Image: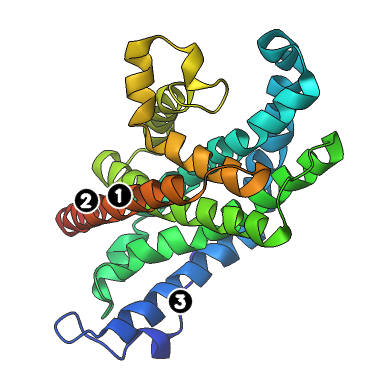
Amino acid sequence: MTITPPIEALTPATREHATLSDAVSQSMVLAQRGIIKLGRHPMGLADVILGPAIFLCLFGYIFGGAVSGDTDGYLHYIFPGIVGLMTLFATMGVAASLSQDLAKGIFDRFRSLPLVRIAPLIGAIGSDIVRQVVSLAALIGFGLLLGVRFQTDLVYVLAAGGLALAFALSVSWVWVLLALAIRDTAAVQGLAAVIIFPITFTSNIFVPPETMPEWLQTIVAWNPVGHLVDALRGLMMGGPVAEPVLLTSAWMAAFVLIFAPLSLRAYNRCT
């Protein structure tokens, strides 16, 4: 399916004389294109709707007793970690959607338009916010259904959701670069999964770092996912908040500052 953005939303700027407002408006139009595509193919949300239920039941009730001896307590411990886990998995949709558009030649058409060069990439990431919101809403819904109760107030819980969404948007630049470099949907999804699994399992999502060997604790201490999960636990279940939020923000800035320019360079080369 090809959706042509309104011409009036794309023509105010040329590549040579683009302003920030042009970049923002064009990115929003292209993000809307991705959201419309998703609305016409809602089955693309099946993984982010069913995934939270599967992971919560799997780790909360099947492994919870063996890990902690208390499934209810472990469910409350692991819930913020599953939020971080599903946040990462949902970002894989950016790579899949982008690689499909590249294969179909959609980005070649974008190149012929007077677009700010980075607008199609920002639009691809912006359209994925729907998947993230659906995943987060499904996860919270299933968690409440299974008995998860937040130990903080609504403002902190909403802040946790906002932090998870912001982290997802920043990490998405990694998958954008991957999609531009490989340009094969199956290969991109497979490699993304290979990257995500070691990162998530060498973090504090499933068990406290204190239970790990000392050398592995060092890895966990530098794991950006671990900092995100620490921040989510503090915001949702109570505990330290300032330091993990600060560290998570630093990681988010690093992802954008490093991978956004590299993605733009890769985009200029491949189109």
User: How far is the residue under mark 3 from the one under mark 1?
Assistant: 24 Å
User: How far is the residue under mark 2 from the one under mark 3?
Assistant: 25 Å
Circle 1 Cα neighbour tier, 10 Å, few/some/many (<14 / 14–19 / ≥20): some
In the rendered image, which quarter is residue 72 located in?
top right
Question: Residue 217 or 24: which is nearer the viewer?
Answer: 217
Q: Residue 158: give x, y in percent of width and height.
A: 64, 59
In the rendered image, which quarter is residue 51 located in?
top right
The answer to whether residue 210 is seen in the rendering is: yes
Callout 3, which amino acid? Val
Circle 2 Cα neighbour tier, 10 Å, few/some/many (<14 / 14–19 / ≥20): few
- Which of disc 1 and disc 3 is earlier in sequence? 3
44 left or right of 224 in image? right
Asked if the residue at tag 1 contacts the one at tag 3, i.e. Cβ–Cβ closer than 8 Å, the answer is no
- The secondary element bearing badge 3 is classed as helix
User: How far is the residue under mark 1 from the one under mark 2?
Assistant: 5 Å
- Identify the residue at horizontal 46%, vertical 24% (top origin): 197
80 left or right of 110 in image? right
Mark 1 lies on residue? 255
Question: Residue 270 or 205: which is nearer the viewer?
Answer: 205
Mark 3 lies on residue? 29
Marks counted in the figure total 3
- Residue 258: image tag: 2
Asked if the residue at tag 2 contacts the one at tag 1, i.e. Cβ–Cβ closer than 8 Å, the answer is yes
- Which of disc 3 and disc 2 is earlier in sequence? 3
Task: Decide: is 69 above or below 50.
Answer: above
Q: Nearer the viewer, mark 3 or mark 1?
A: 1
Callout 1, which amino acid? Phe
Task: Decide: is 127 above or below 209.
Answer: below
Q: Nearer the viewer, mark 2 or mark 3?
A: 2
The answer to whether residue 103 is seen in the rendering is: no
Callout 2, which amino acid? Ile
